């Protein structure tokens, strides 16, 4: 069976939920304290042994390219200033990957973005990681998904449980357990209203696909939001091939909307020794001040 060697990272979206901040700045570059979201996704892939990373980019996404590039003038400055620790960190990022950038000229949807990478992926199985979902460190989600792929040779997607009122934010799957922790997908629907949702198991931005998905994407018509949806192509794939699902252990940080982004930043800050004490004190003060406003409303 073919090895998984490549990952596609669609990063061409408008970032509408964060406008105007995303007018000239990709949401994938938003910092979680001092590391951009996209670097977490890349480090997760490297941790799973995937080094061929294909970014599907668009207009205004240049900062992502700069981030993973060598910055000689910055390095020189840090060297002269004797800031060796930061210099080492910066060099590590510059040499982290040899990225490939593919341009999605029109933002026609996530499915269309994945299809844009076809000439680079070719006829091999590949990973898709979405640029706004960070997974709890050390959970080996991608490695587990790769193992499932290696056993069955079929597509595998990651799922996690969401609040039943939030199904309209995600692709939702109906599943059947085949063995502990491994499921078969029975049906899929993109962003259903809670009353129409087949479950509260949401697709969570990590996928392994057989190359057959490209054929299905070519036939996919615009769906929810007028966009060519990856979930719709997966539903067509399901008519021909089994799709497995893996339920994510641990936490999922969705940085794609302001509230969850803030929660992610706060939690990561609280994990840092040098920030924890001051932040806890500050949060205590503001919580007591603002919770009174909630009581009144
Ligand atoms: C996309 C997918 C959706 C998935 C979600 C989170 O939606 O279309 O199926 O559940 O990512 O991974 P988006 O957040 O881009 O609207």
Image (tube, rainbow, N blue to C red):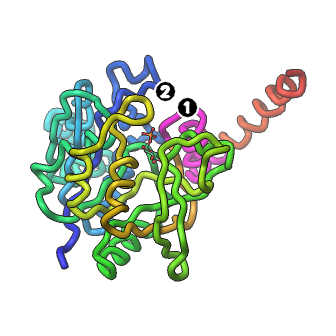
Residue 137 can be seen, yes or no: yes
Residue name at image x 22 percent, y 60 percent: 212
Q: Are marks 2 and 1 in contact (CB under 8 Å)?
A: yes
**Which residue is at a point 11% across and 57% down the rendered structure image?**
122
Quarter holding residue 58: top left
Q: Residue at x 49, y 49 (%)?
A: 189
Q: Could you tell me how far apart the alpha carbons at marks 2 and 1 are, in whole angstroms?
A: 7 Å
Horizontal relation, residue 14 to residue 199: left or right: left
The reply, left or right, for residue 218 in relation to residue 160 is left
The label number, if any, that marks residue 17 in the structure image = 2
- When asked about the image quadrant of residue 102, the answer is top left
Q: Is residue 270 magenta?
A: yes
Disc assigned to residue 96 = none
Q: Identify the secondary structure beneath mark 2.
A: helix
Ligand 1: image quarter: top left
Instruction: Using residue 189 as the reference point, say whether residue 23 is left or right of it.
Output: left
Q: Which residues are magenta?
A: 255-277
| Mark seen at residue 258 | 1
- Percent position (x, y) of residue 160? 55, 58
Q: Residue at x 29, y 31 (%)?
A: 108
Mark 1: secondary structure = helix
Quadrant (top left/top right/bottom left/bottom right) for the N terminus:
bottom left
């Amino acid at each position: 069976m073919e090895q998984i060697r490549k990952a596609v990272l669609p990063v061409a979206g408008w970032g509408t939920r964060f406008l105007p901040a995303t007018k000239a700045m990709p949401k994938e570059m938003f910092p979680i304290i001092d590391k951009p979201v996209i670097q977490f996704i890349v480090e997760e892939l490297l941790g799973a042994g995937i080094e061929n990373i294909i970014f599907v980019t668009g207009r205004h996404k240049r900062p992502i390219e700069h981030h993973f590039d060598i910055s000689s003038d910055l390095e020189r400055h840090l060297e002269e200033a004797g800031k060796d620790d930061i210099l080492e960190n910066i060099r590590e990022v510059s040499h982290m990957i040899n990225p490939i950038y593919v341009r999605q000229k029109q933002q026609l949807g996530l499915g269309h973005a994945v299809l844009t990478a076809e000439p680079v992926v070719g006829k091999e199985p590949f990973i898709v990681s979405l640029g706004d979902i960070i997974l709890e460190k050390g959970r080996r989600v991608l490695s587990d998904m790769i193992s499932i792929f290696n056993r069955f040779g079929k597509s595998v997607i990651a799922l996690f449980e969401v609040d039943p009122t939030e199904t309209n934010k995600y692709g939702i799957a109906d599943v059947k357990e085949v063995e502990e922790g491994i499921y078969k997908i029975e049906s899929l629907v993109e962003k259903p209203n809670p009353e129409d949702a087949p479950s509260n198991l949401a697709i969570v931005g990590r996928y392994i696909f057989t190359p057959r998905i490209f054929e299905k994407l070519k036939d996919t018509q615009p769906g929810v939001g007028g966009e060519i949806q990856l979930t719709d192509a997966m539903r067509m794939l399901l008519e021909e091939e089994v799709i497995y699902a893996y339920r994510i252990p641990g936490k999922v940080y969705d940085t794609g909307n302001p509230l969850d982004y803030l929660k992610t930043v706060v939690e990561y800050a609280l994990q840092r020794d040098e920030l924890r004490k001051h932040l806890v004190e500050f949060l205590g003060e503001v919580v007591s001040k603002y919770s009174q406003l909630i009581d009144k409303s």
